[in-house]
Amino acid sequence: HMPSTEIQNDIYVHVGQRIRVRRALMGMTRKQFASKIGRSTRQLRRYENGEGKAMSMDRLHVIATALEVPADYFFMRLI
């Protein structure tokens, strides 16, 4: 049984917040980080705002590596 759209949206928002917080903790601007992961600042803003529905697991792995965290970091405290 698939999660409802509302739950899916909550997950995207949570992951986006985790990306934004970790990026800030590392002292990187959105522009610097977007360049590091090979995405535009506009696309990174979408990810950070929870609009990353098109974010693949490969992309999440690239982001995790750039932020020096394991992929499960983004899902901590989700439930």
Image (spheres, grey):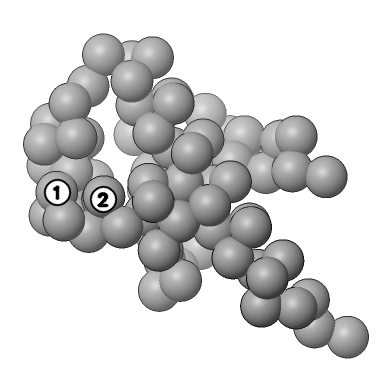
Amino acid type assigned to the residue bearing label 2 in the image: Leu
Q: In which quadrant will I find the N terminus?
A: bottom right
Say above or below: 62 vs 20: below
The location of residue 7, given as percent across then percent down, is: 72, 66
Q: Which residue lies furthest to the right in this view?
A: 1
Mark 1 nearby-residue class (10 Å; few <14, some 14–19, many ≥20): some
Q: Mark 2 points at which residue?
A: 44
Quarter of the rendering containing residue 23 = top left
The location of residue 79, given as percent across then percent down, is: 83, 45
In this image, 67 relative to 35: left or right? right
Q: Is mark 1 on a helix, strand or loop?
A: helix
**Residue closer to the observer: 43 or 49:** 49
**Residue closer to the observer: 31 or 7:** 7
Q: Is mark 2 on a helix, strand or loop?
A: helix
Q: Mark 1 points at which residue?
A: 41
Q: How many marks?
A: 2
In this image, 43 relative to 9: left or right? left
Q: Residue furthest bottom?
A: 1
Amino acid type assigned to the residue bearing label 1 in the image: Thr
Q: Residue drawn 17% across and 26% down? A: 29
Quarter of the rendering containing residue 46 = bottom left
Residue 22 in view in this figure: yes
Q: Which residue lies furthest to the front in this view?
A: 6
Mark 2 nearby-residue class (10 Å; few <14, some 14–19, many ≥20): many
Q: Residue drawn 59% across and 65% down? A: 9
Residue 61 in view in this figure: no
The location of residue 3, given as percent across then percent down, is: 78, 76
Q: Residue 14, which numbered label?
A: none
Q: Residue drawn 54% across and 58% down? A: 12
Q: Do the residues labelled 2 and 1 touch (CB within 8 Å)?
A: yes
